[in-house]
Amino acid sequence: MPLITGNYIPPGIFKNADASTIYSATLRKVEIPVYERERIELSDGDFIDLDWSYSSDRKSDKLVILLHGLAGNTERPYMKGMARIFNDNNWSAVAMNFRGCSGELNRLFRSYHAGASDDLAEVLTHILSLGKYSKIALVGFSLGGNMLMKYLGENRSLPDEIIGSVGVSVPCDLSGSLGAINRMRNFVYSKRFELNLKQHLLERAEKFPDHIQKKQISACKSLRDIDDLYTSKAHGYNDASDYYKKTSALGYLQKIQKPTLILSAANDSFLSPECYPYEIAEKSVKIYLEVPTYGGHVGFVTRSNIYYHEKRALEFVESL
């Protein structure tokens, strides 16, 4: 598909990538009604918590599924903001907490990762069993966007109810994105991710002392160390390199058969050049790539409390 130019111009200071990224992640406030939580049991004995929010017409047959990013959950402003705009336009929304991200440690040693598409497949199976939704759209942010792209591009039968998807700030090449995050300019971000993930691993070590030890976790000095120690091994990959190679969205984009918008800012310091799949999008009949000059990482601030990526996601899905 032709590349989409877009017309996003942020106000004032938010032309700065760090200002838009930090404000959107930590200072933005989004008010929505309290989620209705549902726990679903997974085939391997674990569980996932789903948080539902509804349009005023709870009988609507339209549903958007939301997938959060690394170290995120359904309480993040970007999740609530997207749920709100869809709810206000007669779509129900279900926000997916990945394993171990809902405030309670999951039952198994494994948790979630950028390629955990089987969990998304099980969530969809559950939702379809409700028999309520004839139109389903999916929106993934950052790591959740990579997971979504992988799911759509795998050799699996996709439900007919899925009409399309949107990925926001997608690290399509996980190794390249890690390299970008590890640059000195991103030291504060990478250290924050590292400390958050190590805290989760320390809780896991308490529950699974035969699988991982606290001294191993303390010895990790980077996100890659964590992926080498835990993320890769706990989920069936040889090491971090094997994990990045086999789960990166880049390896799946060409096979996507549902209309998909990838919206990533050119000034997103978390993304490497390989994360912008220009050539694939130009040749694809299903992938639309929009790369605004500004926006940082999931930071498409506007003068209102409806962000540009929220407006674009709704517009794209409703055009299908």
Image: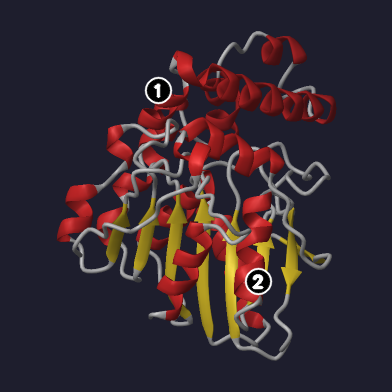
Q: Mark 2 vs mark 1: which is more N-terminal?
A: 2
Residue under label 2: 93
Other-residue count near label 2 (Cα within 10 Å), few / some / many at <14 / 14–19 / ≥20: many
Residue type marked 2: Ala
Residue 45 position in % (x across, y down): 74, 54
| Image mark for residue 45 | none
Residue under label 1: 179
Secondary structure found at label 1: helix
Residue 18 position in % (x across, y down): 52, 31
Residue at the spot 52% in from the left edge and 77% down from the top edge: 136
Q: Is residue 106 above or below residue 230?
A: below
Residue 254 position in % (x across, y down): 25, 57
Point out the image quarter for the C terminus: bottom left
Point out the image quarter for the N terminus: bottom left
Q: Is residue 139 above or below residue 9?
A: below
Location of residue 244 by image quarter: top left
Residue situated in front as seen by the camera: 146 or 202: 146
Location of residue 94 by image quarter: bottom right
